[in-house]
């Protein structure tokens, strides 16, 4: 411990390697069935271990876990034997108030964490839901995440493509125009208003767009070549008039530049002109666009066209 305080670095001298490896193997087997080779590869590539474990050594760790009361089950997948822990004595219990607190904290942190962290949290909640007796809270825990009903393989694929800026064609169930193929030059994947989106340049409409991942039926094709996404970000300044005692909560891509008694100067930044327009429309008459002039003209023109549509009717 003195060494850790001095160097702030974890070394082999600070670890009980036998206990540490036992915990790792326990975690692997409770997560999903693993073969000997999968466990060996994980230990070999571990940040602190880098150790080659023999099959005989693994059997010793298995027997140690069994002696603690773990029930290790052997199954066959495509002719390969794998092992999993289907019961153990290290049970957790949660009362209703603790579960409510977990849900409350999750809703706060889920707005700003990476999608992969979100997937890890969802896996964690699925596990602890088994130890919750209240059926309503159990259901909330397993469905709290915006990715709870989305194929994790699809999410991981989209994240990889977005990181590489690949162009993909998706078979998309559009709420407006129905099912169709859409080609997107991917930019990022993220959470917005409690929903998971893939963002990128939409070849069909020649603009920066976002697509609900839950509406993606499948990925039709992928162009693995890297392309440069040249869509610039747009910063819009607007004045917001607050009601008495109203608390204004800015979005993640907004910042408050200045404030007076009842007026706020807000800047919002986005690559999507459509998203910017949606935000301004949502705030309605309490919002007045100040700059830039071309976006201000765009909003005015849009509002005039909307009025003309109603006048015709």
Image (spheres, rainbow, N blue to C red):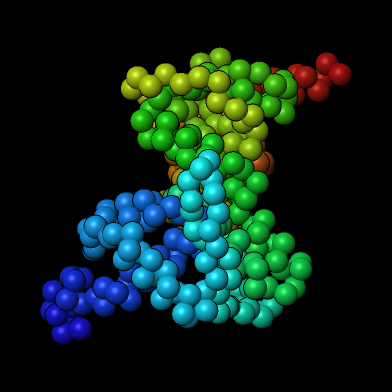
Q: Is residue 287 above or below residue 185?
A: below
Q: Residue 49 placed where, x, y %?
A: 24, 63
Q: Residue at x 61, y 35 (%)?
A: 212
Residue 92 shown left or right of residue 37 in the figure: right
Q: Position of residue 233 (x, y in %)?
A: 40, 32
Q: Residue furthest bottom?
A: 2
Locate residue 273 relative to residue 244 in the image: left or right.
left
Residue 267 sits in quarter:
top left
Q: Is residue 212 above or below residue 125?
A: above
Q: Is 133 left or right of 111, judged from the image as shown?
A: right
Closer to us: 124 or 277: 124
Residue 262 appearing in the image: no
Quadrant showing the C terminus: top right
Q: Residue at left 36%, top 51%? A: 37
- Can I make out residue 128 in this image? yes
Specify the quadrant of the image occupied by residue 19: bottom left
Q: Is residue 125 above or below residue 228?
A: below
């Amino acid at each position: 411990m003195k060494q850790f305080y001095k160097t702030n670095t974890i070394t082999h001298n600070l670890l009980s390697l036998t206990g540490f490896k036992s915990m790792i193997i326990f975690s692997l087997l409770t997560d999903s069935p693993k073969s000997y080779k999968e466990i060996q590869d994980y230990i070999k590539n571990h940040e602190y271990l880098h150790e080659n474990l023999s099959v005989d050594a693994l059997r010793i760790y298995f027997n140690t876990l069994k002696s603690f009361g773990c029930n290790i089950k052997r199954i066959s997948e495509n002719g390969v034997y794998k092992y999993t822990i289907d019961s153990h004595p290290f049970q957790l219990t949660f009362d209703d108030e603790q579960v409510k607190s977990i849900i409350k904290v999750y809703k706060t942190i889920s707005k700003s964490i990476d999608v992969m962290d979100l997937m890890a949290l969802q896996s964690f909640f699925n596990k602890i839901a088994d130890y919750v007796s209240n059926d309503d809270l159990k259901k909330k825990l397993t469905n709290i995440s915006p990715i709870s009903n989305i194929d994790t393989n699809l999410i991981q694929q989209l994240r990889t493509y977005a990181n590489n800026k690949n162009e993909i064609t998706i078979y998309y169930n559009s709420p407006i125009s129905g099912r169709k193929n859409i080609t997107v030059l991917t930019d990022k994947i993220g959470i917005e208003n409690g929903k998971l989106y893939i963002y990128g340049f939409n070849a069909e409409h020649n603009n920066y767009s976002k697509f609900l991942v839950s509406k993606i039926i499948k990925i039709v094709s992928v162009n693995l070549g890297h392309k440069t996404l040249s869509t610039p970000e747009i910063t819009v300044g607007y004045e917001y008039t607050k009601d008495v005692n109203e608390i204004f909560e800015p979005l993640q891509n907004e910042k408050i530049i200045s404030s007076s008694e009842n007026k706020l100067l807000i800047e919002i930044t986005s690559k999507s002109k459509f998203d910017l327009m949606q935000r301004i429309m949502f705030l309605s008459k309490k919002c007045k666009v100040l700059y830039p002039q071309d976006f201000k003209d765009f909003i005015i023109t849009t509002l005039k066209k909307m009025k003309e549509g109603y006048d015709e009717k």
